[in-house]
Amino acid sequence: MRFQDQAVRMTHRALDDIVRSARAVPQDRLAWVPMGFSRSVLSQMREIAAAGRWFLPILRDREAPEFDSHAAREAARIRRGFKTLDQCVDAARANTSALCEAIEELADEHLDDELHLPFGGGVTLSLADVAMLHHNNMVYHLGQINQLQLMLGDREMH
């Protein structure tokens, strides 16, 4: 199996997992912010809805995105545009599908190509690493949503 096929399969599975967990949270608790500073399920799903778009130009254009204050404000504006969980899920599915198409198109000989990206103060990643960023971000947020479920008394595996 090609790495690209595995990355696509894992990314779609991570999206299915996080959607299933988010949908298990009671509607009246989607915007709940425990302790006043953690992120709500809806906040995290807004990020997931938009995140597929963040990595797409990196894979297609092989260029680091601008990550200045204007870009941060624009990203926040896009996230705020998702008002409901259903809107988040629809956008996440569309953006993840577009990203996965780009992952499938990656040539094997370019998987080790490296790019310097502005994330976390600057990091150098291979295109294979970039192909997994959306997956990794969703798995991270899945854990956060699962923790919120535990705080709400939900002990089921979703």
Image: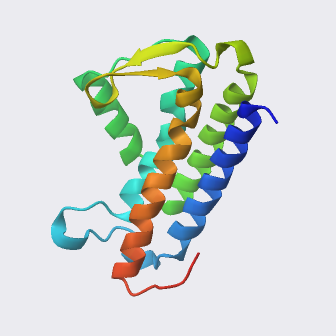
At 56% across and 26% down in the image, what residue appears?
56
- Does 33 sit above or below residue 87? below
Q: Judge from the rendering whether residue 51 lies leftward or rightward of residue 153; answer left or right.
A: right
Q: Is residue 140 above or below residue 99?
A: below
Above or below: residue 87 compared with residue 66: below
The residue nearer to you, when weighing 87 against 67, is: 67
**Residue sitting at 28 percent across and 32 percent down?**
73
Side (left or right) of 9 relative to 22: right
Is residue 82 visible in the rendered structure shown here? no
Give the quarter of the figure containing the N terminus: top right
The residue drawn where x is 70% and y is 13% is 109
At 19% from the left and 62% from the top, the residue drawn is: 37
Residue 150 seen from this side: yes
Q: How far across and down, in percent of the image, does residue 50 sit? A: 48, 40
Kindly indicate the quadrant of the structure image that contains residue 117. top left
**Viewer-proximal residue among 151 and 3:** 3
Residue 101 lies, in percent from the top left, at 72, 30
Q: Closer to the camera, 31 or 141?
A: 141
Q: Is residue 32 left or right of residue 137?
A: left
Residue found farthest to the left: 36
Where is residue 89 shown, x and y percent of the image? 57, 55
- Percent of width and height locating residue 113: 57, 13
